[in-house]
Amino acid sequence: MDDGASAVRQDTDLRRHARMLHRTHDAMLTGDEPPMAPRGVVARSWTRMRVGGVNPDRCCGGDPVSPDALELRRHGSPLTGMLYGLRASLVSVAEEAGHLMVVTDADGMVLWREGCPRVRRRADALGFTDGVRWTETTVGTNAIGTALVEGAPVQLFSAEHFARTLHSWTCTASPVHDPRTGQLLGIVDVSGSAATVHPATVALVRTAVRLAEADLWREREVRLESLRTVAGSLLGRVHGPAAVVDDDGWVAAVSGIAPTHPVAAPVEGEPCAVPGIGTCVPEPVPGGWLLRREAPGAVPLRLGLDIATRPPSAVVEGTTTWRHPLTLRHAEVLVLLMRAGDAGMNAFALSQALFGDHDHVVTVRAEVSRLRRKLGGLLLTRPYRITPNVIIEPCDAAAVLRMRSGATPTRS
């Protein structure tokens, strides 16, 4: 079997293949020589499971959150606006094929399940219910959790699942991303009996996700256009450079500066840095935010990386100074872009620098998207780079790598 997203081919003998996978799974647990090599995506996940000490005889997503907490998650999820399209694309097909459509958030929490009642009851018996976290760390190798880790579509069949209680299942999952920012929003999954596995399910789920992402793009463009209708009058009353942006930091209109890239998602009361404007305190306006200079006078922005703390922090200095805590991966990305200068780096170059190959481009794009939500307009795309008019403070790149290996940084 190849290492594509599909777990089987059209001509696969499912019973024979399932037996081989069971023997391979047993060999993996006992340390014996396996009768076949698992697919790359499965082997990587099984390695994570063994390192993490996951029990293959225990499959439990834990207790579900309360109904109120679940409704709060659903209400706050951007996937809510995609449900109509996903239902139209998948639910009727899932019901006829004896499958269940499952939608989770970016944390792997199951938000919605729809489809075949019989399969839903089977899922309930496993604890695969609304409000549980269905991730690799909770239930082992599974399409939802593994797709979250891999950042790519995943189909699993039978004993490719790590937990033995899932060996009678097949699952096909695909990540959903914000089409504007690349941010991971959640997972769409189709699950059912292992006997119903089909390679075409991968394309079906992928297509449904792409259509849903297109719907989200159109919905947000409509909201941004609505914000543009009021931006002119807002900016006309502002002295000096200013911008009107939506809740995600996308720019509807500017005054006194050149059109700018998206900025960090505004948070009321928290300062942010906008190239061409400086330090701003976001002011809520109908449908978005007004960003204008906090104090008179042009103050250059400086960007530094403090690695003497755990976690490390990006330090932005303007009329005020503030810090953004970073993961170690985000610190690595930032220091690479700081070293790259105006030339920047594309996703393939970052994948090579971070992972030693070009196979993690999707992961890189997701990580940079999360970093841009913190630093906004300080990071540009195509290629990824620091905004030219931001002064970069020197940073010890080798020290960042030592942090990932476990060494403790010291203050100079």
Image (cartoon, rainbow, N blue to C red):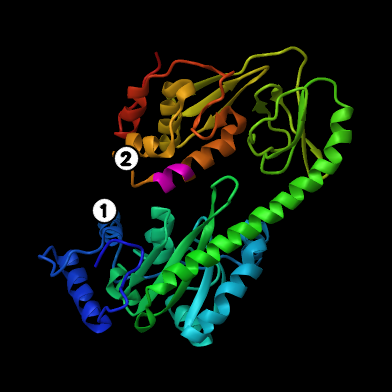
Query: Could one spot residue 135 in this view of the protein?
Result: no
Residue at image coords 68%, 40%: 250
Residue at image coords 46%, 62%: 174
Q: Say whether residue 363 is magenta.
A: yes
- The picture places residue 138, in percent across and down from the top left corner, at 40, 62
Label number found at residue 51:
1
Residue at image coords 48%, 64%: 206
Quarter holding residue 199: bottom left
10 Å crowding of disc 2: few (<14), some (14-19), many (20+)? few
Q: In which quarter of the image is the C terminus?
A: top left
Amino acid of disc 2: Phe
- The picture places residue 82, in percent across and down from the top left corner, at 63, 63
Relative to residue 261, is residue 298 depicted above or below? Answer: above
Quarter holding residue 236: top right
Q: What stretch is highlighted in magenta?
A: 361-365
Label number found at residue 36:
none
Question: Which residue in the protein does label 2 denote?
Answer: 355
| Front residue of this view, candidates 317 and 229 | 229
Q: Regarding mark 1 in the picture, which secondary structure is present there? A: helix
Dot 1 or dot 2, earlier in sequence? 1
